[in-house]
Amino acid sequence: MISPSNHVLVTRPAHQSQQLCECLLEAGFKPIAFPTIDIVPLSLDHNKKYILENISTFDFVLFISANAVHQVTAYKTLWPSDNTRYIAIGPSTAEAMVASLAITPDFISSKPFSSEQLMTQLPSQLADKRILIIKGEGGRDFLANELKNKGMIVKTLDTYRRSLPTNIAPHVKHADIAYITITSILALKNLTLLLQDDFSTMAKRCVFVLFSERIEQYAKQIGCTHTIVSNNANNDSLVQAIKQSTH
């Protein structure tokens, strides 16, 4: 049975949750901030700094997340380069690029906002082109491998790592939560670790509001009964999806 309350669990990293919480409040919901991922910046050594200072040597720069954008804002005065085309993995990353770097992406992955979808939108002639992928530590190798298969010269640059938070709010386990927003598979995996045995109850009772069909597939695999995929991968779409589900 779905909970009739209007409490929404927001699992975004702490520095990204405020805007979503404000949007939920304006829409009449009661957000509960419960970050399931900590974003830890990685130090930039001489080689990494050199790459970021010479972005014009790349034909393409691909940002894998909004967090990747936020870690390189100190170099925004050197960008954009007339020789470089910019790629965003999805709408939230594109918004961060515009807001933090004053860069409008040349390519933005459309729904379902996946690496697979992005590959279908890139130019067909990519052989010998140089691309820099700015990303977090770990993650999928799909894009790098596919771009190499197309003959591209691929360079990756890790600017942050994702870790499991240690400061757990015990009241969350006992709150009457109706909706849980999930913006990545890792956020959902970490939620199961943080809630432990309580997760199975939430999985049956709560509505999971998700950024993509890929996340939904994983949610179904681990027993989430009620799922909704937002129309776009941004805060407004998450809130809209919740509002529509209440009618």
Image: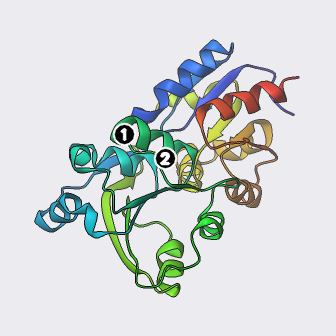
Q: Residue 174 location, x and y as percent?
A: 62, 27
- For this rendering, which residue is in front, 204 or 113? 113
Q: Residue 233 location, x and y as percent?
A: 62, 44
The quadrant the C terminus occupies is top right
Quick one: label 2, few (<14), some, or many (20+) residues within 10 Å? Answer: many
Q: Considering the numbered disc 2 on the image, is that residue within a helix, a strand or a loop?
A: helix
Which picture quadrant has residue 7? top right
Q: Is residue 7 visible?
A: yes
Quick one: label 1, few (<14), some, or many (20+) residues within 10 Å? Answer: some
Residue type pointed to by label 2: Thr
Residue type pointed to by label 1: Ala
Is 14 left or right of 91, judged from the image as shown?
left
Q: Residue furthest left?
A: 46
Residue that appears at 48% across and 50% down: 105
Q: Is residue 171 visible?
A: no
Q: Is residue 215 above or below residue 120?
A: above
Q: Considering the numbered disc 1 on the image, is that residue within a helix, a strand or a loop?
A: loop
> Residue 102 bears which disc, if any?
1
The quadrant the N terminus occupies is top right
Q: Residue furthest front?
A: 82
Looking at marks 2 and 1 on the same chain, the residue that comes earlier in the sequence is marked by: 2
Residue that appears at 22% across and 50% down: 78
Q: Is residue 241 above or below residue 77?
A: above
Q: Is residue 97 above or below residue 60?
A: above
Q: Which residue is mark 2?
A: 93
Residue that appears at 27% across and 43% down: 73
Is 18 left or right of 7, judged from the image as shown?
left
- For this rendering, which residue is in front, 71 or 121? 121
Q: Residue 217 location, x and y as percent?
A: 74, 59
